[in-house]
Image (cartoon, coloured by chain):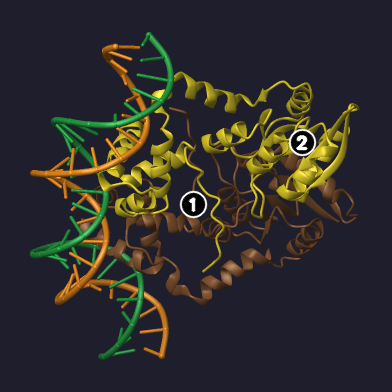
Chain colours: A yellow, B brown, C orange, D green
Amino acid sequence: MIRLLIADDHPIVRSGLRAVLHGEPDFTIVAEAATAQDAVRKAGLADVVLMDLRFGDGMSGARATAAITAAAHGPRVLVLTTYDSDADILAAIEAGATGYLLKDAPPEDLAAAIRAAARGQSALAPAVAARLVDRTRDPAAALSAREAEVLGLVAEGLSNLAISRRLHLSQATVKSHLVHVYAKLGVDSRTAAVAAATARGLISGHPVVHRNV
Amino acid sequence: MIRLLIADDHPIVRSGLRAVLHGEPDFTIVAEAATAQDAVRKAGLADVVLMDLRFGDGMSGARATAAITAAAHGPRVLVLTTYDSDADILAAIEAGATGYLLKDAPPEDLAAAIRAAARGQSALAPAVAARLVDRTRDPAAALSAREAEVLGLVAEGLSNLAISRRLHLSQATVKSHLVHVYAKLGVDSRTAAVAAATARGLISGHPVVHRNV
DNA sequence: TCCCGGCTCAACCTTTCGATTGACCCCGCC
DNA sequence: GGCGGGGTCAATCGAAAGGTTGAGCCGGGA
């Protein structure tokens, strides 16, 4: 019997998972969590945690995943989310997720992935797996950590001068990084780079919590 | 008895909605649709359509909504989505949606909104309603159609020259629009404008279907 | 060991962008 | 009819960004 924890902030999704998994005789849902913090708290109860990546409030699913997998003998974490952006995928895998499934997966795949995760086997959605092999096959297209950091600040609207100050660099260095970024992305301006990076999911295109001014 | 059509590309969400709505005696789910096209086809069967805005494939929920509400004596459309960005909200309302609910809404609210929609009454999630009143209270902050159009192209990485050609304008006009955009958003560069607009959901921050190069 | 790649910086030049001023047309509203 | 706002365009100027060349440092892999 595989004990499951459902961590998702949407009641409808939790209901859907309950309904979909109810028919499987070897699954038992031992707890649900509507926040990432709650998921970390209840993780000990389960063998496999079904983890969403984005929660309405502060803590991200990736951080919760890291907290859960850091513990010895902790449960496996199967990420189950809507998004297949590179930034999300990498964050989840680095956080120690055992598998990564998209919410549009058919129920059979979900059950299979849960059983695989329970055995400690990695289970990746085909789209996610494709992204990863692309990345490893052509590492040249991947931005270095520093380049991604600079690009992230560009995406926030900072000028080169502001970025240089933020990172304690000279403007020359910032420009240098950006030249490399442009070359790797095949663009020739900062806004085009941001657009390309957002489209490819290289930067975490979003969690800006917006208050309506 | 209110006849419902569930239009969502995620099997899990459809299961969740079925489960949540099953307990309501005055609801009957007459059909489900996994694509926007399918939703348009089956719309005639229902009194109220629960419509997601983003589908995996081409057609958007907003366009499907427009197609459905364009028909005489068509069903009401209650948008039920994850996103509360201005661009999504406006697109749905302009398309003729009767209500707009977020997927993190509690099931009671969902049932209430469906009954309201069936009666032809508008039902808006509090967060969505707040966005709308903010917009009407301070129309100065809202971008004009042309300004939003220009900003959208800026977000795609086009230069002023490229934008002027795309819209059959002079560069001077493009600059003029951008000056107004910057003033309204309180920024002073194109990338900052894109960041601000994305954060506030003024531009449709994304459905770029990306193939991994 | 040497070489490569990432990270850092400098100087210089060209292009683009942003800011300002001023102008005209058209439409809807008072 | 006047007035305001949106949309269009022009000219100018300074600032920022982009492109190029060149160079030094450091760490890891061949």
> Where's residue B35, x and y in %?
64, 39
Q: Chain of mark 1?
A: B
Location of the C terminus of chain B (image quadrant): top left
Residue sitting at x 75%, y 37%: A50
User: Mark 2 and mark 1: span between their CA atoms?
Assistant: 32 Å
Q: In this picture, is B180 found above or below B199? A: below
Residue sitting at x 63%, y 59%: B97
Q: In this picture, is B213 found above or below C23? A: above
Nearest-to-viewer mark from 2 and 1: 2
Q: Who is closer to the viewer here, B119 or D12?
A: D12
Crowding at mark 1 (Cα within 10 Å: few <14, some 14-19, many 20+): some
Judge if badges 2 and 1 mark residues of a common chain.
no
Work out whether residue A68 can be spotted. yes
Q: Chain of mark 2?
A: A
Q: Which mark is residue B204?
A: 1
Circle count: 2
Crowding at mark 2 (Cα within 10 Å: few <14, some 14-19, many 20+): many
Q: In the shown orientation, is residue D23 left or right of residue A188?
A: left
The three-letter amino acid code for the residue at tag 1 is Ser
The residue under label 2 is: A49
Q: In the shown orientation, is residue A206 left or right of residue C27?
A: right
